[in-house]
Amino acid sequence: MIRIILVDDHAVVRMGLKMLLDANPEMEVVGEASEGNEGIELAESLKPDVILMDLSMPHGKDGLSATIELKKSMPEISILILTMHDDDEYLFRVVQAGASGCILKSAPHEELLSAIKMVADGQAYLYPNATKRLMEEYVTKLKEGRNLDTYSTLSEREKEILGLIAKGYSNKEIGELLVISVKTVETHKSNLMEKLKMKTRPELVKYAAQKGLLDFGV
């Protein structure tokens, strides 16, 4: 029996997935979470075989941040990322985060079930054509001499906030500039610092400068 935790911010999506998976005699949904932090807590207490993790969860910890944290503390758990984005950039982020695989939300039910069985068995899974595209993009980046570090795991919003933090803007000022709440700014800040393994503002300033984010065009 493959024990599974569902992490998705949409209750209707979780309900549909639970019905599908519980109908399979080889699978059992043992827990559900609406964001990454909750998913981490459930994983620590329930010790599932597989976590089906949504990539984009705007409220709380996102799927990539949660994956990075989980793979540090519980490397034995297989994490299959669910995404709507058929995009090379997201593929790289998923791989670098340590997930066992990535599958599109539009995939047929049979493909999802097969993917879960594969990652539960210790194999990697990428949706059709993703492997070829991933390798092509990797070779391109190497030829261009681009740095394949954790910067590529940051979302565009996280990169934007990183630059503003490094320029000296407060959380409140960043929220006003980007028209988002202070709580959302704090969440993004926490996620990006976790991904970059940094704890202080000076570290962020130095890193942002290295990445060319201090042009003070804002």
Image (spheres, rainbow, N blue to C red):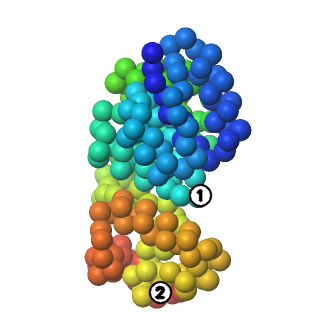
Q: In this rendered view, identify the residue nearer to me: 70 or 129.
A: 70
Q: Secondary structure at mark 1?
A: loop
Residue at x-position 47% and y-position 86%: 169
For mark 1, does the 10 Å Cα neighbourhood hold few (<14), some (14 to 19), or many (20 or more) residues? few
x, y percent for residue 132: 44, 34
Q: Is residue 167 above or below residue 18?
A: below
x, y percent for residue 160: 50, 73
Residue 210, image quadrant: bottom left
For mark 2, does the 10 Å Cα neighbourhood hold few (<14), some (14 to 19), or many (20 or more) residues? some
* Residue 58 marker: 1
Q: Is residue 196 at all visible to an observer of this figure?
A: yes
Q: Is residue 87 at all visible to an observer of this figure?
A: no
Of callouts 2 and 1, the N-terminal one: 1
Q: Secondary structure at mark 2?
A: loop
* Residue 205 marker: none
Q: Amino acid at mark 1?
A: Pro
Residue 206, image quadrant: bottom left
**Which residue corresponds to mark 2?**
169
Residue at x-position 43% and y-position 80%: 165
x, y percent for residue 146: 33, 59
Q: In this rendered view, identify the residue nearer to me: 11 or 137.
A: 11
Q: In this rendered view, identify the residue nearer to me: 190 or 98.
A: 190
Residue at x-position 58% and y-position 52%: 57
- Quarter holding the N terminus? top left
Q: Amino acid at mark 2?
A: Tyr
Q: Disc 2 to disc 1, how far (Cα)?
A: 22 Å
Residue at x-position 58% and y-position 14%: 24
Q: Is residue 185 above or below residue 124?
A: below
Residue at the right extreme of this rendering: 12
